[in-house]
Amino acid sequence: MSNDNTSKKRSKDSIANVLIVAISLCLVCSVLVSTAAVVLRPIQERNKAIDRKKNILKAAGLLEEGKAVDELFKQIETKMVELATGEYVEHIDLQKYKLKQALKDPELSAPLAAKEDIAKLRRQEKYSVVYLVKDQEQIKNIILPIRGAGLYSTLYGFLALDRNGSTISGMSFYEQGETPGLGGEIENPRWLAKWQGKQIYDATGAAKIEVIKGVVDKSRPEAVHQVDSIAGATLTSRGVGNLVRFWFSEAGYQPLLSRISTPSG
Ligand SMILES: Cc1cc2nc3c(=O)[nH]c(=O)nc-3n(C[C@H](O)[C@H](O)[C@H](O)COP(=O)(O)O)c2cc1C
C-alpha cells in the first residue's frame, strides 16, 4: 500500500508531468496576453487619438475642463498640406495617414541633408496634417505639428500661431522621453506659457526664435524672439528651440504660412 502511494507520487513528479504543466501554463498565459493585446489595441489607439486632439486644443488654448474633447474639436478644420509648396492636397486620406509609416515610405518622405537637419530628424515627411481654427471663414489660429530631437528622445508636439503667421499663441508636447523633472519639464504649462506672444520671424522673414540659457533680458529688442531655457535642462530646451526654427524654415511650414497668413493678424 505504502509502496503504491510512493510510486504514484513519483509519477506525479516525473519530468514529463512537470514539462506538461509548464508548457500548458505558458500556452494559457500567452493566449491571455495576446488576447489582451488584440482586444486592447483599438482602445489604446482611440486613447492616443484623443490625447493628440487634447494637445492640439491645448496648444490653441481651446481645451476646457469638463467638456468632451471630440465636441471641442469640432471647431477645428483639419487639412493636409504639401510642405514644399504650402498648397492643400486632397489625394491623401487624412483618416488613414500615419506619420511613422509615412517616414518609411519614399513616396511620402525624403532624407534630410545634415546641414539643414537642425532638429536631427534624418527624414522628413513631404505632407503634413495642419489644423485651422476659423472665425467666420477667416483663419484665427493655425496649429502645426512639430517634432525634433531632445537630449534622449524625439519630442512630438504642436505649436499654435496667430493669423499673422509669426506670433506664437501656444505650444504643447504629447510624446517625449526626457528625464522627468529635467527635460520632461517641456510639458510644464509654466514653461510653455513663456512661448506665448513670442515672434518666430524677424523683420527679414528669417526664423529667429531661440532658447537662451538663463533668463531673457526683456529690455532688449531681441527678447521677442527669445525664451528662457529650463534650469538644469538646457540641452532639451535647446532642442525645442532648434525644432521650432526647423519647422518654421523654408523646409517646414514657411511656404504654407506665406500663402495663408494675414499680416494685420
Ligand atoms: C540623470 C541625469 C538626467 C538628465 N536629464 C536631462 C534631460 O532630460 N534634459 C537635459 O537637458 N538635461 C538633462 N541632464 C543634464 C544635462 O546632462 C546637462 O547637464 C544640462 O542639460 C545642462 O543644463 P544646465 O546648464 O541648465 O545645467 C541630466 C543629467 C543627469 C545626470
Image (spheres, rainbow, N blue to C red):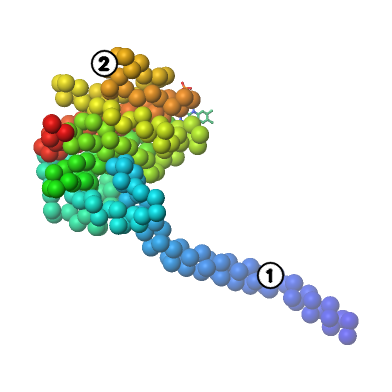
Locate residue 23 relative to residue 229 in the image: left or right. Answer: right
Name the disc covering residue 3, or none: none
In the displayed structure, 45 sits above or below 213; it is: below
**Earlier along the polypeptide chain: callout 2 or callout 1?**
1
In the displayed structure, 80 sits above or below 200; it is: below
Indicate the secondary structure of the residue bearing disc 2. Answer: helix
Q: How many labels does the image show?
A: 2
On the image, the x and y values in percent for residue 113 come to 24, 31
Tell me what residue is drawn at x 39 percent, y 43 percent: 175
Instruction: Name the residue carrying label 1.
Output: 18
On the image, the x and y values in percent for residue 8 come to 79, 80
Give the Cα distance between marks 2 and 1: 77 Å
Indicate the secondary structure of the residue bearing disc 1. Answer: helix
Location of the C terminus (image quadrant): top left
On the image, the x and y values in percent for residue 251 come to 19, 33
Amino acid identity at mark 1: Val
Residue 152 shows in the view: no
Location of the N terminus (image quadrant): bottom right
Residue at the extreme right of the image, as rendered: 2
Amino acid identity at mark 2: Pro
Instruction: Name the residue carrying label 2.
Output: 221
